Image (tube, rainbow, N blue to C red):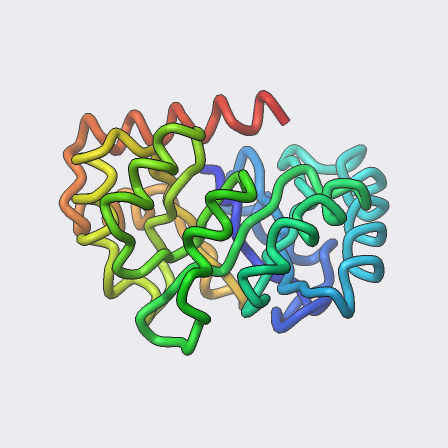
Amino acid sequence: MIDLHSHSLFSDGALVPAEHLRRAEALGYKAIAITDHGDMSNLDFIIPRMVEASEDLNWHSKTRLIPGIELTHVPPALIGPLTTWARELGALFVVVHGESPVEPVAPGTNMAALQAGVEILAHPGFITEEEASLAAKKGIFLELSGRKGHSLTNGHVARMAEKTGALLMVNSDAHEPGDLMTAEYAEKVALGAGVSKEGYLKIRRDMDEFITRL
């Protein structure tokens, strides 16, 4: 099991990174990323601390902790510069909080994230075919979300990915211990979105290759 979108108490999650990692380890995870919510006010606070925590904790855990960041409700014009800054601060990859159907995300966020070349576009809502095609061209993952509300458009995202060849990823967007998914539940999220069994196995392989590159 790999999960590349979750949160600690450095934003609105419930746990310190050490406990978050330990709970993932107890569930048999290969890797988990903490991608706390960030904008221009806190990237330089969150990212260096998460990098340091991962460097310390990874000596003592079978599960790999990966430091990332989720740019959240950032004006589209600022996504590019903040993506660059996040990487300079040490984030191994950047997630953007996409145009979820249950939050007032600024229109144009999906496209700005794709143009910035982020690694993951989380819960992108009613993503357009043009946007999905750009994701496919750039190798950017579109997320199928295990989180209530954000998951409402998983079926649409899966159809757009199938039509354009965009990469998919299944993540929990976990904020609390009970949000962490088992491998069986992650498979249900994918199959429930209309992904075939073979398609889900490809998602697992693509996620594994992604963390290997990191």
Residue 141 in the image: x percent, y percent? 42, 38
User: Which residue is at a point 19% across and 26% down the rendered structure image?
Assistant: 198
Position of the N terminus, as image quadrant, is top left
User: Which residue is at a point 31% across and 70% down the rendered structure image?
Assistant: 101
Q: Is 136 on the left or on the right of 179, as rendered?
A: left
Q: Is residue 135 visible?
A: yes
Q: Is 151 on the left or on the right of 143, as rendered?
A: left
Q: Is 48 on the left or on the right of 160, as rendered?
A: right
The quadrant in which residue 136 appears is: top left
Of residue 26 and residue 63, the one placed in the foreground of this image is 63
Q: In the picture shown, does residue 19 fall above or below 33?
A: below
Most extreme residue toward the front is: 77
Residue 120 in the image: x percent, y percent? 48, 44
Q: How many numbered marks appear?
A: 0
Of residue 82 and residue 152, the one placed in the foreground of this image is 82
Position of the C terminus, as image quadrant, is top right
Q: In the picture shown, does residue 208 fall above or below 55?
A: above
Residue 93 in the image: x percent, y percent? 62, 40
Q: Is residue 21 visible?
A: no
Q: Is 35 on the left or on the right of 195, as rendered?
A: right
Q: In the picture shown, does residue 137 fall above or below 39?
A: above
User: Which residue is at a point 31% across and 50% down the rendered structure image?
Assistant: 185
Residue 132 in the image: x percent, y percent? 30, 42
User: Which residue is at a point 49% across and 22% down the rendered structure image?
Assistant: 209
